[in-house]
Image (cartoon, grey):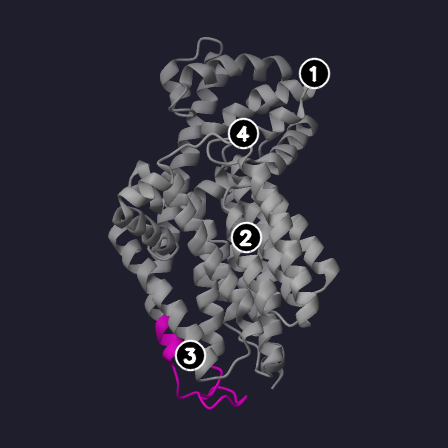
Amino acid sequence: MLIEKYMNWIAVIVGLVPLGFLVFFVSQHYINVPFSDQWGLVPLIEKSLRGDLSFEDLWVQKNVHRILFPKIIMLSLAVKTHWDIAYEVAVSIILSCGIYVMILWQTFRTFSQQKLKQPIDAPILLSLFIFSLSQYENWLWGMQIQIFLNLFVVVAGLFILNNRLSYSHVIVAIILGFIATHSFANGLVYWVVGLIAVLFLPAKPKVRWIYIILWIVFGAITIFSFFYGYILKGQGVSGLLSNPASCLLYVFVALGAPVVAFHVNGAAIAGVSGICLFVLVVLYLLRKCHTPMEQLIPYICFALYAIGSAVLTSIGRGDLGIQQAASSRYITTSNLLWIANIVLLSLAFHRQSDGKNNLRTGKNYTVQAFFVFLLPFIILSYFTGMKSGVGLGNATRVARVSILVTYPETNLAVIRMLNYNRPIYARQMLDTLKHYHLSLFRE
């Protein structure tokens, strides 16, 4: 039938609905004023405008991260637009679209390799996670471009490796790994999951060893560069060793937050369930369906990157409490576990247990039942994020208007709405913004 012929395209178009609503939501509520750590960019923007910005300014550690490449992007945008933060937010959305396209392309490619009918639910389900408003902080706060840039280059690196293992592809993936590591600390995990891809993807034994050596050598150089002059912050590995149960709970909450972002205990249960589901479905595909390992590698790497990132975050941020693990800013990376589960589950139930390439019959509704069960939680997390995002946007809008009306006599309580930890510093930075007509003073 004509409808069946174009069903995949219809699914892709429907999958863009969450993106459309995201763009509308962000345009109405994004934070068009420096917020929280973003105030630390003001001196760097001033140096850029004066022409005395140094490499050390770009390289210096930011909390537990080195955000060299996000700084370059944000400072370039700030200089060209008088720091209109809307451009930073727009770049984050563009990067997320790139992530969506690459993962969807990889999904269709995997199903084609298995000679299976393309899953029409994949574009919609992937879109619900990737463009979910449960990540409201990352969507509304321009500085979170660092997370989207990190995830974009990680997915791109794994996509390139999986497409074809060759010298050029490995070198490009290594370059992307350097960018990922110096965009967000989670990029350190990329070198582990990328090594798994190099180990298992098809290649001649002699050539594979060359790839492995290249990966390990350049990975070690990149990791060394990251930690050179590094100042340890947070609880560190010692905190993990002294209280492993607490750190493990932190990991479970962070991984479950994409599904149950509104309840810490629920997120922990979802996190455990997500990991167990991932392990079981991979084993099922390998043992029962005899699926080639190389076809599962992209999704295994996605899931392991999410898990490794959660572990790394628990080391750096675990001392801030379990509630912090459910923060919306970490959902973007944790989404990869659930994205992997979506694709692997769909693949598993399109295969017969005897390993033959037959299409799933209409009698098996296990996958549909699973996602129907999850859907209310995902939707509730979505609207919880939307509500929180509206509240954050309104609060910063009030602060912005108040500053415009009362500057230079702005009350410290108003500025604290934009920088709770360092309001006095933020008030001092307002003079720089005013002098150079930046951000809220750009017009």
User: Which of pointers 3 and 1 lies earlier in the amino acid sequence?
Assistant: 1
- Residue at 47% of width from left, 50% of height from top? 332
Residue found 39% across the figure and 47% down from its top: 385
Q: Which residues are magenta?
A: 349-371
Distance from disc 3 to disc 1, alpha carbons, whole Å, reads 60 Å
Q: Where on the picture, by quarter, is residue 341?
A: bottom left
User: Which marked residue is nearer to the observer: mark 3 or mark 1?
Assistant: 3
Q: State the separation of the CA atoms marked 1 and 2.
A: 36 Å
Q: Residues within 10 Å of mark 2 (few under 14, many from 20)?
A: many
Is residue 194 something one can see in this rendering?
yes
* Type of amino acid under label 2: Tyr
Residue position for label 4: 229
From the image, give the main secondary structure of the stretch colored magenta. loop
Q: Is residue 413 left or right of residue 293?
A: left
Where does the image place residue 264, in percent across and percent down from the top left? Answer: 27, 49
Question: Is the residue 429 above or below the residue 207 in the image?
Answer: above
Q: Nearer the viewer, mark 4 or mark 2?
A: 4
Location of mark 3 (residue): 284
Q: Quadrant of the C terminus?
A: top right
- Rounded to the nearest whole Å, what is the CA distance between mark 2 and mark 3? 26 Å
Look at label 4 and name its amino acid. Gly
Crowd around label 4: few <14 · some 14–19 · many ≥20 (10 Å): few
The residue that mark 2 highlights is 190
Q: Nearer the viewer, mark 1 or mark 2?
A: 2
Q: Amino acid at mark 3?
A: Tyr
